[in-house]
Amino acid sequence: MITNLDEIAAYAALHETENQSFQLFLKTQNAERTDEFVKVLNERISPQIDCTQCGNCCKTLMINVNEEEANALAGYLHLQRSDFDERFIEKGMHGMMLINQIPCHFFKEKKCSVYDYRFAGCREFPGLHLPHFIQRLFTVFMHYNRCPIIFNVIEELKYSMEFKK
Ligand code: SF4
Ligand code: SF4
């Protein structure tokens, strides 16, 4: 298993064509069976990777925020919502809100400084426990080169599903 971020990025750059082929292969596979493979691999691999030693998602993800989350975190930080929004939020169309900085403002000393108030997108990432893996290939592979959990699950998945490299 590779966990070094530089090694993962280098490996990913060398295997772009293979990964495109693997995505095409996955789209021909049974969705429920694929979800089951991913679930089993995720349950085996995730506990072996220490996210507190990585934190790469906090340095690279665009984080969506909803009203409830913004209110809760503003309260925790003893800020008026208007001040919170001004400092931390970028507003888009249809009321969409994003954290206005990458890396995330709240990533401090290699960890989340607002852990109990982190957003749903942070809690769920990398999301390999979720169903419909085949429908989420674009997003999953977007993070293949920077999330050790995704990287190692995908590499094992190639073997589990007998993908011919
Ligand atoms: S979820 Fe992935 S990118 Fe985020 S800290 Fe864990 S291993 Fe690193
Ligand atoms: S809120 Fe915390 S977990 Fe979410 S991206 Fe920021 S630092 Fe990471």
Image: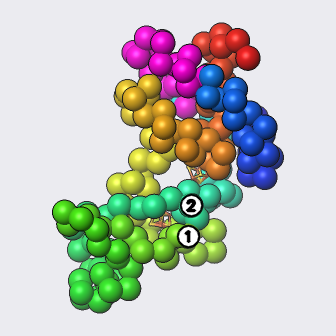
Asked if residue 41 lies in the magenta stretch, the reply is yes
Which residue corresponds to the image point at 63% horizontal and 22% vertical from the top-left? 21
Can residue 149 be seen from the camera position used here?
no
- Name which residue type carries label 1: Pro
Against 56, residue 69 (above or below) is below
Q: Is mark 2 within 8 Å of ligand 1?
A: yes
Position of 44 compared to 95: left or right?
right
* Residue under numbered circle 1: 103
- Image quadrant holding the N terminus, namely top right
Position of 62 compared to 151: left or right?
left
Query: Residue 40: x and y, percent?
Result: 53, 23
Position of 73 compared to 49: left or right?
left
Which residue corresponds to the image point at 78% horizontal and 52% vertical from the top-left? 6
Asked if residue 121 lies in the magenta stretch, the reply is no
Give me the C-alpha separation between circle 1 and circle 2.
6 Å
* Residue under numbered circle 2: 60
Query: Residue 163: x and y, percent?
Result: 65, 13
SS at badge 1 = loop
Query: Residue 86: x and y, percent?
Result: 32, 86
Q: Nearer the viewer, residue 52 or 15?
A: 15
Against 45, residue 108 (above or below) is below
Which residue corresponds to the image point at 56% horizontal and 38% vertical from the top-left? 141
Earlier along the polypeptide chain: callout 1 or callout 2? 2
- Image quadrant holding the C terminus, namely top right
Is the Cβ of the residue at disc 1 closer than 8 Å to that at disc 2?
A: yes
Q: Is mark 1 within 8 Å of ligand 2?
A: yes
